[in-house]
Amino acid sequence: MNESKEQIDIRRLTLKNGLSWPNDKELIMLILGTGTRKMPVEYMAEKILDVICATNQEQWVNELQKIDGVGKSRALSIAAALELGKRHNRSPQAQVHNPKDVIPFIKHIAMQSAEHFVAITLNGAKEIMNIRVLCVGAGNMAVLKPSEIFSEALKEHASGIILSHNHPGGHAEPSGQDLATTEHLLRASELLGLALLDHIIITKNSYFSFLEHGLLPTLK
């Protein structure tokens, strides 16, 4: 299938301005090259981005194959490209000293039109171990059991966990449900012996840290 004018423009502008110029969808379009007759590359890239943002890494290959035009080989190529990028951008010395240190790792969910809830696990040196999608959709976090939220962190022997979700409406202030859910999860984390270090609400232009606003114990 021939490349679209949009695809050609993205390649030209990326060559001119560098790899930091394209947005996430456009980067995926560059990886794909072309779409199919039924699924133009721009729509395929959008669906692929939705899968990446809504599922965890171990599910990517299977979930990507459900998209029309993305077979096993293409799904594996996309997942491999993402893993390569993650490996080369990982900084073993990077530590979370304050909430702002976490923002670069979760800013992608701020662009999503649906609420995405993620958990960031940290080791004893306050280094990020993993970032997992807990659920997608407004209100879904309220029905999650603490065991479902903290189970993977306990399996990883994490020393602490940071929760985060986006507010698509653009206001970072916590809702009454956000406050109640965080208080409930704080009590559960104390019983499990796993420190709930922060809950960060992120939007396209700002963020709200429960820790910074004195709503959680101080991060030591």
Image (cartoon, rainbow, N blue to C red):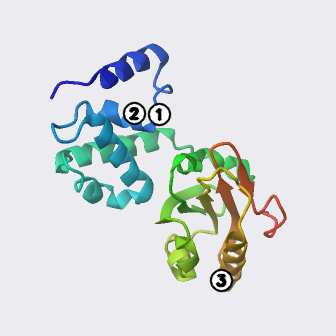
Quadrant where the image shows the N terminus: top left
Residue 110 x, y percent position in the rendering = 58, 49
Where does label 1 land, which residue?
23
Does residue 95 appear to the left or right of 131 in the view shown? right
- What crowding class fits label 3: few (fewer than 14 Cα within 10 Å), some (14-19), or many (20 or more)? some
Quadrant where the image shows the C terminus: bottom right
Q: CA distance from mark 2 to mark 3?
A: 40 Å
Decide which of tag 1 and tag 3 comes sooner along the chain: 1
Q: Secondary structure at mark 3?
A: helix
Q: Residue at x 73, y 55 (%)?
A: 208
Whether residue 164 is visible, yes or no, is yes
State the residue in front, 136 or 14: 136
Q: Secondary structure at mark 2?
A: helix
Marks 1/3 in contact by CB < 8 Å: the verdict is no
Question: In this view, which residue lies farthest toward the right?
Answer: 214
Residue 206 x, y percent position in the rendering = 70, 46
Decide which of tag 2 and tag 3 comes sooner along the chain: 2
**Residue 111 disc label:** none
Nearer the camera: disc 2 or disc 3: 2
Residue 101 x, y percent position in the rendering = 68, 48
**Residue 27 disc label:** 2
Whether residue 154 is visible, yes or no, is no
